[in-house]
């Protein structure tokens, strides 16, 4: 579904990603892990089109994304939930979801997608009229994920969904991700610092360090020793 071929990204002359290649298969949950500053968030921004490539190609369902702007990529079925939640604080929960449903597929599938969101996160249904900025951190993360789901995506990219959440709330978010994976109609690409939780959920994993891929493969094949060596350098 998604193929990155030797992509490189630079900021102000500093290389953030170097010759990164990655394959994400339809229906899978793939995880990208690595230490802070490894380039994980930059990778997502490159896929969603908010930072330009210096080299390489990104293919999505057979289409080269090079000339396709970020807003058109959303209409193609790419949804990006950035780290830090970033909901529209002055809008209600329902208005946030309606913003997500502005894609072609989101408008066509609005009724079904909203039912799915409210089933996955019942608290959002209860608080649909509440201003998003007054929600708790965990509820805002639910809303950020729900807003992405409202676009009826084919690829859902989740950047650090457990960041800043209590362990209980983080578990709730991971339960929702697991439910989406079971349903199987959305491909998920996950960046997560909770490495153990990410690997327990995913089909395939890629480890980034200093903007380069240092380890990749089926999650079941990544031994603890190999992961420690790649992730921690020990």
Image: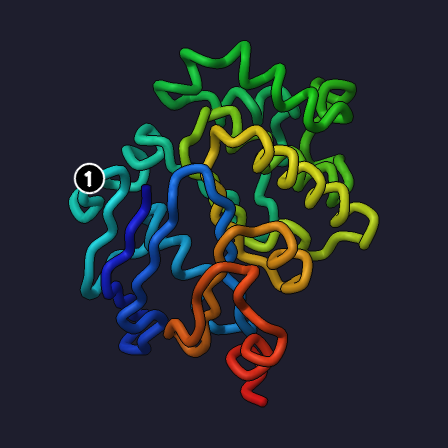
Task: Find disc 1 in the rendering and name its residue.
Answer: 63
Query: Residue 65: which quarter of the image?
Result: top left
Is 41 drawn above or below residue 144 in the view shown?
below
Q: Nearer the viewer, residue 1 or 54?
A: 1
For the point 71% across and 18% down, which residue is it?
Answer: 129
Is 144 drawn above or below residue 55 in the view shown?
above
Dot 1: what SS?
Answer: strand
For the point 52% across and 29% down, which residue is it?
Answer: 149
Query: Residue 78: which quarter of the image?
Result: top left
Q: Is residue 99 left or right of residue 154?
A: right
Screen quadrant of the C terminus: bottom right
Q: In the rendering, at what x and y percent does residue 199 appear?
A: 60, 59
Q: Is residue 8 left or right of residue 120?
A: left
Q: Nearer the viewer, residue 42 or 61?
A: 61
Q: In the rendering, at what x and y percent does residue 156 appear?
A: 47, 39
Q: Nearer the viewer, residue 230 or 41?
A: 230
Residue located farthest toward the bottom when viewing the structure as drawn: 234
Q: Residues within 10 Å of mark 1 (few under 14, many from 20)?
A: few
Residue located farthest toward the front when viewing the structure as drawn: 221
Q: In the rendering, at what x and y percent does residue 154 appear?
A: 41, 32
Task: Tell how many labels.
Answer: 1
Is 75 drawn above or below residue 125 in the view shown?
below
Screen quadrant of the N terminus: top left
Is 15 drawn above or below residue 100 in the view shown?
below
């Amino acid at each position: 579904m998604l193929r990155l071929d030797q992509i490189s990204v630079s900021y102000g002359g500093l290389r953030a990603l170097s010759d990164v290649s990655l394959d994400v298969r339809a229906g899978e949950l793939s995880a990208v892990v690595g230490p802070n500053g490894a380039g994980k968030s930059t990778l997502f921004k490159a896929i969603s089109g908010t930072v330009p490539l210096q080299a390489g190609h990104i293919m999505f369902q057979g289409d080269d994304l090079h000339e396709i702007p970020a807003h058109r990529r959303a209409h193609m079925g790419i949804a990006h939930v950035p780290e830090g939640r970033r909901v529209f604080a002055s809008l209600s929960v329902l208005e946030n979801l309606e913003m997500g449903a502005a894609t072609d597929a989101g408008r066509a599938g609005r009724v079904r997608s909203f039912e799915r969101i409210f089933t996955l996160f019942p608290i959002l249904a209860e608080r649909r009229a509440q201003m998003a900025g007054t929600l708790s951190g965990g509820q805002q993360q639910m809303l950020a994920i729900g807003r992405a789901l409202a676009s009826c995506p084919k690829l859902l990219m989740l950047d650090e969904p457990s960041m800043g959440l209590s362990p209980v709330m983080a578990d709730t978010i991971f339960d929702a991700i697991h439910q989406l994976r079971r349903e199987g109609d959305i491909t998920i690409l996950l960046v997560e610092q909770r490495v153990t939780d990410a690997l327990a959920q995913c089909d395939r994993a890629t480890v980034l360090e200093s903007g380069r891929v240092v380890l990749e493969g089926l999650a079941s094949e990544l031994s603890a020793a190999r992961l420690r060596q790649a992730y921690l350098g020990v």
